Image: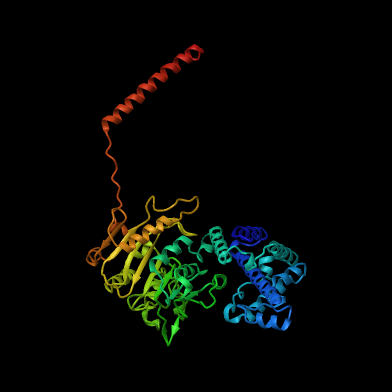
Amino acid sequence: MTTKADIERVLWKACDSFRGKIDSSRYKDYILSMLFVKYLSDVSKERRAAYERQYDGNAERVERAMSHERFKMDPESSFDYLYANRNDNAIGQKINVALSQIEERNSGKLRNVFRAIDFNSNVDFGDVKAKNATLRNLLEDFQGLDLRPGQLGSADIIGDAYEYMIAQFASNAGKKGGEFFTPSEVSELVASLVKPRENDRIYDPTCGSGGLLLKAYAKIPGGKAHLYGQENNAQTWALCKMNMFLHGVDDADIWAGDTLSNPQNIQEGGLMRFQTIVANPPFSLDKWDSGFLSNAATDENGKKKEKMSASLDPYQRFDWGVPPASKGDYAFVLHMLRCLDNETGRMAVVLPHGVLFRGASEGKIRKQIIEFNLLDAVIGLPANLFYGTGIPACILVFRKNRGRDNVLFIDASGEGNYEKGKNQNRLRESDIARIVQAYEARESADKYSYVATRDEIRGNDYNLNIPRYVDTFEEEELVDIDEVRRNIADIEAELSGVQAQMDAYLKELGLS
C-alpha cells in the first residue's frame, strides 16, 4: 500500500532535484504538475487493466469503457511514456506536448491548467544538458511511486499530500509563496464559522490554491454544493484547478483574473449571489484600483493622474466609499457583501487588524456596514499564524438578514489559545472548538469575549479595535516591600560571608 508518508518522501526527494537551481516558489509548479500527471497515469492504467480483465482483452469494448471514464489519457501523455523517454534530448518538449494533450482531451475539466508552466524553459532549467539532467532526475524520482487507487490507503491521500506540499512550499518560500495558501487550521476555523449547507453556492473571490473552498465543501455530507472561485495569479489558479480535481471536485467554477476590476461571477448582467463566502484576501493590497483606471500614468510628483471613483465600477460595489489605493482590504469586503445572498448569506473573511480602526474612507465604509447590520462577529487571532507575515490577523463574520443587532467580539490571541511553534504558531483543535463554541453561544466571557450593542460601537465612533470591548488586562500581584527588603538583606549578608572567605583564601596563597 502507498501511504501519505510515501508520497511526501518522494516529493521531498524531487525537491532535491531542483534545490540550488530554481527558486522554490517556481519549482513547486513542476513537482506538483508531475505528481498530477503520475496520478492520472496510474489511475488510467488501473482502470484499463480492470476493463481488459472484464472484457477478456476485447480492445473495442475496453476503449469504449475507457471513453466513459472521469478523464481521458493517450499513451503518449502517460507518465510511463515520459519515463521511457527520459534520456531523450527533447524530453522537456515531450513533457509539454503530453501536458497539452491532457488539457485537450479533458478540456471541460482541465483547460489551461498547464498554460503557465514550461518544462522546456531555458530560463528555469539552463542549457539543454542541465535541463535534461534535472528532468531525468525528476522522472526517476516519481517512477517508484504507485498511485493506483487500489494501492492507496485512502481516497483522500493524494489530495492531502498535495495540500501538504503546497503548505511546505508556502512555508519555505516566505511572502512570495505564502500569499497563495491559508494554513489548514485557519481554513478549518473559517469554514466552521459559516456552516455551509446542502445546495449552497460557496464562493472565494481570492481562492489561491483552493484550500478554503475545499474545507467549506468538506463540511457538507455528500458534497451537495457548488464551488466558485477566482484567482489572479496564473500559476496559483492552475494549482487550484488541480487541487479541486485531486479532491474529486470536477464541477467547480474556478475563474482566472482580477476579481475587483474583472469579476467573473456574472449572471444576467449582474454579480452572482452566494449563500456562503469564505476568503483570505491579500492583506492591504497596494494599487488594487489599477484595473479600473484607463490611464495609470503618474504626474511629476508620482501621483496618479486618474483616481478611482465609485462611478468607475459598473456593479456599484463602492457606493459606501472607495477604499484607499494603498489598502485594498475593504475593496474585497465590499465586493463580497455585494455578492452575498440576501436571505441566508454568511461570510467569513481573514483580514489585518487595521480594518478595525483605520479612519478616512475605511472608517466611513465600516460605519455603513455596521448601520446596515451586516457585521456579526470580530475574532482576533494569534500572531504568526500565516506564511510570509508575523502580524496578527482577525476574522470578520458577516450575515445577511440577521435577527440581532449586536456584534460579538472574541480575543483568541492570548497565551493558552494557540500552540507556539519555532517558526510559526498554530491553532489546535481545542482552540478552534473554543472559538466556534463562543461564536455560537454569543455570551460575554471574562478576558475572552464580549457582546457589544450597536450603541456601544457608535459610542466608540465605529472603532472595532478588540481591546475596546474585550478587557484582557491582567493585574500584577502586589509586591511585599518588607519581604523584598529582607531578601536583599539576606543576599547582602551571604555575599559578605563569601567575600570574607575569599579574602582568607587569597591571604593563604600570599596573593593579598
| Residue 94 visible | yes
Say above or below: 339 vs 327.
Answer: below
The location of residue 238, given as percent across then percent down, is: 57, 73
Give the tally of numbered discs: 0
Q: Residue at x 44, y 55 (%)?
A: 428
Report the front residue among 467 and 240: 240
Q: Using residue 200 as the reference point, say whether residue 57 is left or right of it.
A: right
The location of residue 336, given as percent across then percent down, is: 39, 74
Say above or below: 290 vs 146.
Answer: below
The location of residue 346, given as percent across then percent down, is: 37, 72
- State which quadrant residue 57 falls in: bottom right
- State which quadrant residue 13 falls in: bottom right
Q: Using residue 204 as the reference point, say whether residue 442 is left or right of it.
A: left
Report the front residue among 433 and 339: 433
Report the front residue among 424 and 26: 424
Q: Residue at x 37, y 52 (%)?
A: 414
- State which quadrant residue 177 falls in: bottom right
The location of residue 437, given as percent across then percent down, is: 35, 60
Q: Residue at x 54, y 76 (%)?
A: 250
> What sort of colour scheme is used for the picture?
rainbow
Q: Residue at x 49, y 11 (%)?
A: 508
Q: Using residue 338 as the reference point, say whether residue 246 is left or right of it.
A: right
| Residue 382 visible | no
Say which quadrant the N terminus sits in: bottom right
Outermost residue, bottom side: 268
